[in-house]
Amino acid sequence: MQAYVYKSQRKQDTYVYLAVRDAFDALPAALLAQLGALSFVIEVSLDAQRKLAQADVAQVREALGGRGFYLQMPATLAGAGRTDG
């Protein structure tokens, strides 16, 4: 499964993974408004061996298959990561 990763220009360390390149219509309008402009970062293959620094590959794949996007938010100051998808 391929994923296309975009960085929010408004929210620091916030990334959106899309199942289809430039398919921003998969994002809810309110979320898209909060994120502001999104700039393309990288295309990645999400196979079982892939490791992601801030997200679980299985969760990303599930979100992409179910709703077409996965939202990766920055870790909190306490060190507990939060990734909503």
Image (cartoon, rainbow, N blue to C red):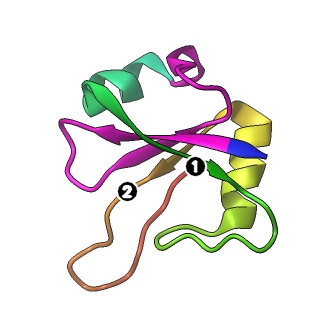
Q: Name the amino acid, label 2.
A: Met
Q: Residue at x 51, y 54 (%)?
A: 84
Residue 73: name its quadrant: bottom left
If you read the primary sequence from the N terminus, does the residue marked by circle 1 or circle 2 appear first? 2
Q: Toward the viewer: 60 or 31?
A: 60
Q: Toward the viewer: 30 or 56?
A: 56
**Residue span colored magenta:** 3-27
Q: Which mark is residue 4?
A: none
Residue occupied by mark 1: 85
Q: Residue at x 77, y 74 (%)?
A: 49
Outermost residue toward the bottom in this view = 79
Q: Name the amino acid, label 1.
A: Gly
Q: Toward the viewer: 57 or 73?
A: 57
Determine whether 30 is above or below 4 in the image: above
Residue occupied by mark 2: 73
Q: Residue at x 30, y 21 (%)?
A: 33
Tell me the element at label 1.
Answer: loop
Determine whether 3 is above or below 21 in the image: below
Picture coordinates of residue 22, whole percent (x, y):
52, 20
6 magenta-colored: yes
Residue 80: name its quadrant: bottom left
Q: Toward the viewer: 27 or 13?
A: 13
